[in-house]
């Protein structure tokens, strides 16, 4: 599509930003849905987040994504924050409102869509969450919101896991959340669990590691999503499959957080499954170095 005086500008605010797949994904959908827009990488230096958000508003940017390391910092420069994003404490999508941008967290809802698409049940089920960082917070929030019966948060530093468990208990009141160290996995009550792997362990180039490596642990895992998507199959996923479970990577979560952002920017659009799959094929080729 030709860029003209009418073209609307969107972008991703991050640092570093060079590795981001979002420009390819959103520009693919803009062509598919005939939107006169362009989506660009926006590298912002530390200490410049306020100027970046105010400047984007002043220049009429149609919307933005925000990623590491600015998902929390950006929040104080917004005119409104969606209820889920406020509870999670992180914003990854900015949508123009009356007097400034409104912040949303589409990571949590993107993960939820990926879980539902794989027919993994949340309500009334016992879940294990590996990790207690930013991504874990979004994952723990959505699992509890959707009615998980029990959530065991296993993290390297147990204090961070406990802090997340406390926060989730405060938000939801009902449902049981327990924190323990990764090394304490033997204390999990005997059962088969669904699991979200949200630590950065196993992400390229650290591909020969998993946060837990003991095959006994994996006998307890029935279905798992590793939110890492490089490599396409992590060691964690391999260990789940070797023990007879089903495992998926985080590419669908990434794509669905993008779908939800795109639809927030364009309320008249509902991306079709074909368009979603097209983006997945494009990103897969990019990740495999074919493009
Ligand atoms: P973060 O806030 O820095 O948290 C990192 C987590 O990994 C913490 O729980 C940390 O434990 C744990 N960890 C790091 N090194 C470890 C080690 N050597 N052994 C055991 N645990 C270790 O990062 P984040 O933002 O949550 O991101 C985590 C991962 O999710 C990244 O790989 C990121 O790319 C991925 N992600 C994917 C998507 C998607 O759309 N698919 C979205 C967001 C993030 P401690 O607390 O003990 O340090």
Image: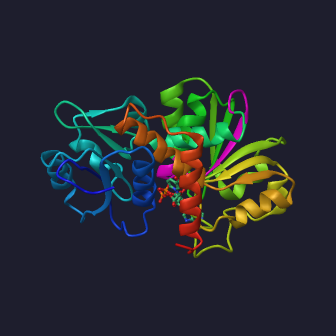
Image spot of residue 185 (x, y percent)? 74, 52
Give the x, y percent position of residue 263: 42, 37
Task: Report the front residue among 73 and 111.
Answer: 111
Q: Is residue 129 magenta?
A: yes
Q: What residue do we see at 36% from left, 36% from top?
A: 266
The location of residue 82, given as percent across then percent down, is: 36, 31
x, y percent for residue 147:
63, 27
Residue range of the region highlighted in magenta in the rendering = 122-136
Q: Is residue 265 left or right of residue 208?
A: left
Q: Is residue 129 above or below residue 174?
A: below
Q: Is residue 61 visible?
A: yes
Q: Residue at x 60, y 65 (%)?
A: 201
Above or below for 22 versus 103: below
Residue extending furthest toward the top:
174
Q: Quadrant of the N terminus?
A: bottom left
State how the image is colored: rainbow
The answer to whether residue 105 of the structure is visible from this angle is: no
Count of marks placed on residues: 0
Q: Residue at x 47, y 51 (%)?
A: 134
Residue 81 occupies quadrant: top left
- Residue at screen point 51% across, 50% down: 135
Q: Nearer the viewer, residue 37 or 143?
A: 37
Q: Is 230 within the magenta?
A: no
Q: 239 and 97: which one is in front?
A: 97
In this view, the residue farthest toward the left is 58
């Amino acid at each position: 599509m030709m860029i003209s005086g009418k073209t609307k500008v969107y972008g991703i605010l991050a640092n570093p930003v060079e590795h981001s797949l979002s420009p390819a994904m959103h520009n693919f959908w803009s062509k598919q849905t005939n939107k006169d827009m362009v989506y660009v990488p926006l590298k912002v230096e530390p200490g410049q987040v306020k100027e970046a958000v105010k400047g984007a508003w002043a220049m009429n940017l149609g919307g933005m994504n925000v990623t590491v390391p600015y998902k929390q910092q950006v929040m104080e420069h917004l005119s409104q924050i969606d209820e889920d994003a406020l509870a999670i404490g992180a914003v990854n999508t900015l949508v123009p409102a009356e007097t400034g941008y409104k912040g949303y967290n589409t990571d949590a809802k993107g993960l939820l869509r990926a879980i539902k698409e794989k027919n993994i049940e949340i309500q009334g089920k016992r879940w294990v969450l590996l990790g207690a960082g930013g991504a874990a917070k979004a994952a723990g929030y959505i699992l509890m919101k959707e009615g998980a019966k029990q959530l065991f948060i296993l993290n390297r530093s147990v204090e961070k896991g406990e802090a997340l468990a406390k926060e989730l208990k405060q938000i939801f009141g009902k449902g049981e959340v327990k924190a323990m160290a990764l090394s304490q996995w033997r204390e999990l009550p005997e059962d088969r669990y669904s699991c979200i792997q949200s630590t950065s362990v196993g992400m390229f180039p650290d591909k020969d590691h998993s946060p837990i490596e003991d095959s006994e642990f994996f006998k307890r895992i029935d279905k798992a999503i590793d939110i890492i998507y490089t490599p396409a199959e992590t060691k964690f996923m391999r260990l789940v499959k070797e023990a007879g479970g089903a495992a998926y990577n985080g590419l669908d979560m990434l794509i669905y957080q993008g779908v939800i952002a795109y639809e927030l920017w364009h309320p008249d659009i509902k991306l079709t499954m074909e368009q979603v799959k097209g983006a997945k094929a494009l990103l897969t080729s990019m990740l495999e170095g074919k493009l």
